Amino acid sequence: MQTTQQLKIGLLNDLHYDGSVEALNRLYEAVATINHEDIGLLVVLGDLIESGSETNAMRLLREVSALCDSFHGTIRYMPGNHDLDDLTKAQFYNALGCAGDEATGSFRQEGIDFICIDGNFSADGTEYACGNFNWEEAFVPDEQLAWLRKQLAAAREPVVLFSHQRIDIPGKYSIQNHAAVRDVIRQSGKVKAVFQGHQHADDLQQLDGTAYYTLGAHKDDAGPAVVNIDARGIRLSRDFQPQQPA
């Protein structure tokens, strides 16, 4: 690791918030737990809600935003396929109070480069919107791959990447052109960790020098995860119980 920065990032994924008291309490407790740590960034990795209609989706996202607003730092939201069952991506961000944000993006936090990949596209490049998709056929369009290549060329090592869908292995929970995405990552040599959700199961794959972490679902009572970045490397903690070093 070339960085001398010390940074902690909170991660929540697959909330599937439905407005129930149980879901509300679960999210409230997760954000409160994260606030006990010195964390400046919270990334929510998609599938925030389960709605059933446009009106309900907007209401649920406003409730999620209100609960997450108690976090003391910066929040970055990413849409998952469930968030787009009844909404467009623009409506998703508007409901969260983040008008103008986009699912694909890069940003720098305390000297570390972060990149968000959006797999919510069909094979022909059509964006997921209002249920016009098959969730098992997620793709990253060629234009986004070209953008990713440029972002990685300009970034400084180490880079951390976020995706709702898996990009490490094949399967219905993965971006279907995952191999093309991984090729861009491998060629850069800069991405040290990828954090992804969607499958609701913990997993870790080490591929070409990159650690691909799949996180179990918040809906299934998986606690918030914390990423620690410092000179020793990038380490993931779940429920603030750090993994033992190898």
Image (cartoon, rainbow, N blue to C red):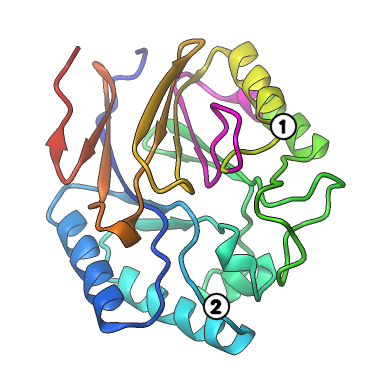
Q: Residue at x 46, y 51 (%)?
A: 45
The secondary element bearing badge 1 is classed as loop
Relative height, residue 105 to residue 78 (above, below): above
Q: Quadrant of the N terminus?
A: top left
Q: Amino acid at mark 1?
A: Asn
Residue 52 quadrant: bottom right
Residue 112 placed where, x, y %? 42, 31
* 42 and 180: which is toward the camera: 180
Query: For this view, does 177 lie left or right of residue 125?
Result: left
**What residue range appears in magenta?**
151-172
Residue 206 placed where, x, y %? 42, 16
* 217 and 229: which is toward the camera: 217
Query: For this view, does 126 lie left or right of residue 155?
Result: right
Q: Amino acid at mark 2?
A: Ala
Residue 42 placed where, x, y %? 35, 52
Q: Residue at x 46, y 46 (%)?
A: 199
* 184 and 51: which is toward the camera: 51
Q: Earlier in the sequence, mark 1 or mark 2?
A: 2
Magenta run includes residue 157? yes
Q: Which residue is mark 2?
A: 95
Q: Residue at x 53, y 47 (%)?
A: 164
Residue 80 placed where, x, y %? 56, 57
Q: Which residue is mark 1?
A: 177
